[in-house]
Amino acid sequence: MAELDIADFPVEHRVMTEREAARYCSLSVVHFRRLRKSQKGPRFVQLGIRRIGYRVGDLLAWLEKRSSTSS
């Protein structure tokens, strides 16, 4: 059986830790947690009882929804 390589997965399906995702979005981890708890943040994945992850595709979609359309 062949071993899986993360490079084989599409980038939008890769999962970032909470800290990595907050940094990717240029936000503090504390603010990122507040957004999640108020259901205003990006979709997340419950990886364990105390571990949250974020798919790159969900982060990109959330950031796109938040981008300004005004000139």
Image (cartoon, rainbow, N blue to C red):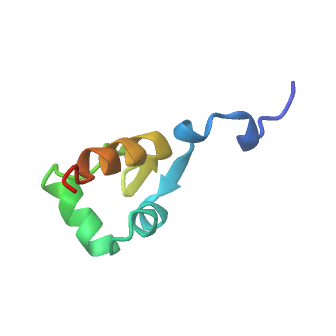
Q: Is 51 or 21 nearer to us in this picture?
A: 21
Q: In the displayed image of the protein, which residue is found farthest to the right?
A: 1
Above or below: residue 28 compared with residue 65: below
Give the image quarter of residue 27: bottom left
Q: In the displayed image of the protein, which residue is found farthest to the left?
A: 38
* Identity of the residue drawn at 43% across and 51% down: 53
Q: Horizontal and vertical percent for residue 54?
A: 43, 49
Which image quarter is the N terminus in? top right
* Identity of the residue drawn at 86% across and 28% down: 2
* Identity of the residue drawn at 27% across and 74% down: 30
Q: In the displayed image of the protein, which residue is found farthest to the front?
A: 71
Q: Horizontal and vertical percent for residue 10?
A: 63, 34
Give the image quarter of residue 36: bottom left
Q: Is 63 or 15 nearer to us in this picture?
A: 63
Q: Is 71 or 1 nearer to us in this picture?
A: 71
Residue 69 seen: yes
Q: Horizontal and vertical percent for residue 14?
A: 57, 43
Above or below: residue 13 compared with residue 35: above
Give the image quarter of residue 50: bottom left
Which image quarter is the C terminus in? bottom left
Q: Is residue 21 left or right of residue 13?
A: left
* Identity of the residue drawn at 28% across and 65% down: 32
Above or below: residue 44 compared with residue 20: above
Q: Horizontal and vertical percent for residue 49?
A: 36, 51
Q: Is residue 10 left or right of residue 36?
A: right
Q: Is residue 27 left or right of residue 39?
A: right
Residue 46 seen: no
